[in-house]
Amino acid sequence: MTPDLSISTLLKAYREGRRTPEKTILEVWARAAEDDPSIWINRPSLQHLQHYLRALEGESPDTKPLYGIPFAIKDNIDCVGLPTTAACPAWSYEAQESAYVVNLLIEAGAIPMGKTNLDQFATGLVGVRSPYGVPQNAFDARYIPGGSSSGSAVAVAKGLCSFALGTDTAGSGRVPASFNNLVGLKPTRGVLSCSGVVPACRTLDCVSIFALTAADAALVYNLTASFDEADAYARKRCMLREPAWPPRIGVPPMDQLDFFGNESAKRLFESAVKTVADMGWQIVETDISPFLNAARLLYEGPWVAERAAVISDLIAENPESILPVTRNIIKGGLKGTAIEAFKAQYRLAELKRISEATWNQADVLLMPTTGTIYTLAEVEDEPIQLNSNLGRYTNFMNLLDLCGCAVPAGFLDTGLPWGVTFYAPACGDALVLGCAGHFHSAVKLPLGKTTTPSSSAALPVIPAAEKKVPMMQIAVCG
Amino acid sequence: MTPDLSISTLLKAYREGRRTPEKTILEVWARAAEDDPSIWINRPSLQHLQHYLRALEGESPDTKPLYGIPFAIKDNIDCVGLPTTAACPAWSYEAQESAYVVNLLIEAGAIPMGKTNLDQFATGLVGVRSPYGVPQNAFDARYIPGGSSSGSAVAVAKGLCSFALGTDTAGSGRVPASFNNLVGLKPTRGVLSCSGVVPACRTLDCVSIFALTAADAALVYNLTASFDEADAYARKRCMLREPAWPPRIGVPPMDQLDFFGNESAKRLFESAVKTVADMGWQIVETDISPFLNAARLLYEGPWVAERAAVISDLIAENPESILPVTRNIIKGGLKGTAIEAFKAQYRLAELKRISEATWNQADVLLMPTTGTIYTLAEVEDEPIQLNSNLGRYTNFMNLLDLCGCAVPAGFLDTGLPWGVTFYAPACGDALVLGCAGHFHSAVKLPLGKTTTPSSSAALPVIPAAEKKVPMMQIAVCG
């Protein structure tokens, strides 16, 4: 049975003296050692972990909000003392210091249990593009785990940590959440620092959070959403000006949705919309074509040049060190011209402008996280097109500067989990977390692979923003 | 003698019945017909102007805030009924409707007196790169007028209109203001719509305003700063949150300034700093190296690809139709790769982040608008380097998302006018206009080529922003 390692459950046990961080860490370390080795690329030794446990001496959940909470780190995010591979051994380096967000988590008392497997260079939504093997989907090993943050998602679902960091450029923080029955928060771009993170598309990258509940994701978000001056793309934490609650939920007309033949997923989406309506929230039918058009820009457009910029030397010097599928995708980025790059940016600006009208009628959009899920065999047969299908409802998000929270919505006929995502404009993190939390509670599902019901979870609490950015009317007169 | 056509002067005369719009329009039309023909590329006929005059029947300065005010339009901005050439006859087209900002001005009662000459495709700061001749500098025909908005600046200085629209990507709205004793406002990027404007670098372009006084520029700004949904790069009008008044003025250390050997300009800058100090404003010595580094990116980096994107077809099909100097610059943009474009954007984001620290210690920066001014002969000898010298204090501004207002600071030993610019972050339009207005009043100079003293001018009034953008602290709780 998978233990419930949700943060609130662990902290409660620590507070009541029923558990110690040491016991938790030893247990999850040992369970990870016996479970699927493909989940991890590197795990610290028990001796190494003692260092973190010692730092908790004299502390408590009152002094360290993540006191003794085990977490996992996608292996394109630095953790001091461990290599960062980005799932490419030839590219690996020893991290000299931890990423900005990892440092914040460790300072808060969380304990890093290891570096997780991913689609190489975070390129993919499938979770099978790694020389370190394929992490097994937590529910059915015949199916893909989802990617690129495959190991992080599976580790949380299987109770090998309480939460995990991923990254999310095109959907890598949401797709594996959906396929492993988790909450996956893709925060507003830049609010979580990317210092110490291997870039995919540097103008679009986000650090993401996998958790069992929206409340856990909100807690981790609150502790990591801290402005990092050293990251040129960092932004001050912000909140949407109108605390629209309950929010108006924009839902696409069914003819704009493609479930790629998965009737069971379609029924789950219809049921999700009904759940929202039953919660008493207003449903607004919303045209999502500007979002779908933007999604296509991501891989068809010049942004793949950003991926190529990261590894152009490696492609030139040691092309064999990169998986063929990954190499072929990223090599496409070597060819584009600056004119094409700017023209695509113009096109994106136009789509963004068109998409903005959406937010006059809806506060939050509800979409499937993916249209369907595939087996390992299906993806092996058709690695590019099926990967692309999985990004239909995720690729546009960072391009259009949105934030979103993926949340479980139920189980497919096949027994695989499946989810939906709540989207809002940048600075709507509290809003999408709030939606995800209320929805999760209403759909009454088990958390991850545990038997704990989602309806028992606390709802997310988002405290005040780091800094208010009021705009005043002023007159400069003589 | 050059008449004082400042907006307030004309409106007062209309209100007191000492003038009619018809009389003004006839007079300035006739004076333009006798003056330097190189100022204009196209002027409407008197018959054509009757249409605008008739629209004022029954109106007054109380109903139309620019009632009967003549203005000029740089010929890369559309005005219905006239061709738009961008100073390239082969590229010319008949404007089917007016640019968004031109429409707003006409609706407010202003009357377009013609389309003004410019450096071809707005590429240049010299004002000599046009097949339509070189508009003579309003003060000394041996010197360059400055560009690219050469004709617009000269027309205002010579009393051929009350104000003029220019564009400003790299300094085209500030350099010619400086060289013709004018106020030149480069507003926050996107606040004035670019719909109906020929792009130079579409991600950076701004419509700019030439006026005799900061108060006039502020009035025109107030009437044109209206959000245009159709322009993907438009932004809602905004104001800096802190009405810092009097502002702390950042001034570069003298060793960061280069006057290219012009000792007279250096003395004028020192004198400008003294004027500010005498006004009782706090002076803060400020490192401007992040700004100077960003300035170099503009022409050395991939942004020239944006210029190439606009005319790549013309370059391929009819290269001879483009001036050699312009063609050679813009052709450079055909070569760049998408990787280079993204890498330069990363570099810019880093410089922007570094530059932001400046605004913790200063509210506004004061810099020379240009280090010096050149003769036509000098620029003919060395067309690229001297043009580049002129952009030292202007090129960085749109890249770093600043706004600025160029303002006269005095006359050089040669008798040529020379100016300084007040800079602030985006949304600081009111602040820089306020600084320029107070400074202009304090330096006591004639307005343009008139004998009206600047100290008699009203100070700019900036009313409330179109829309407040407050950010609230919210909690989404269960």
Image (cartoon, coloured by chain):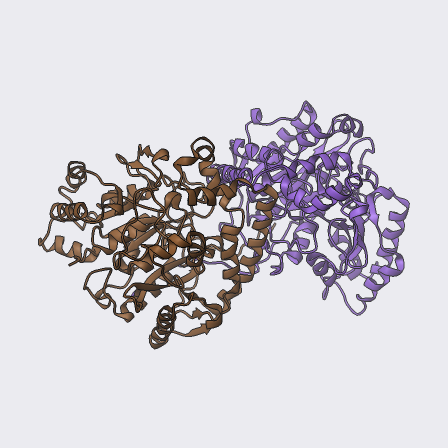
Chain colours: A brown, B purple
Instruction: Identify the residue at horizontal 31%, vertical 32% (top origin).
Output: A96
Comparing A151 with B471, the one in front is A151
Q: Position of residue A43 (x, y in %)?
A: 23, 41
User: Could you say where residue A4 lies in the image, as x and y percent from the top left?
Assistant: 18, 58
Residue A80, image x and y in percent? 28, 36
Where's the N terminus of chain A, which quadrant?
bottom left
Q: Is residue B40 above or below residue A309?
A: below
Give coordinates of residue A349: x percent, y percent: 56, 54
Q: B120 or A252, which lies in front? A: A252
Relative vertical location of residue B380 with respect to residue B336 in this rendering, above or below: above
Q: Is B103 drawn above or below residue B269 in the view shown?
A: below
Relative side of B438 to B289, left or right: right
Q: Is residue A82 left or right of residue A308?
A: left
Relative to B106, does residue A148 appear above or below in the rendering?
above
Let me know if residue B168 appears in the view: yes
Q: Say if residue B213 shows up in the picture.
A: no
Considering depth in this image, is A68 or A65 the residue closer to the camera?
A68
Between B111 and A270, the one lying in front of the other is A270
Residue at image coords 42%, 74%: A283
Q: Residue at x 24, y 66 (%)?
A: A454
Image-quadrant location for residue B323: top right
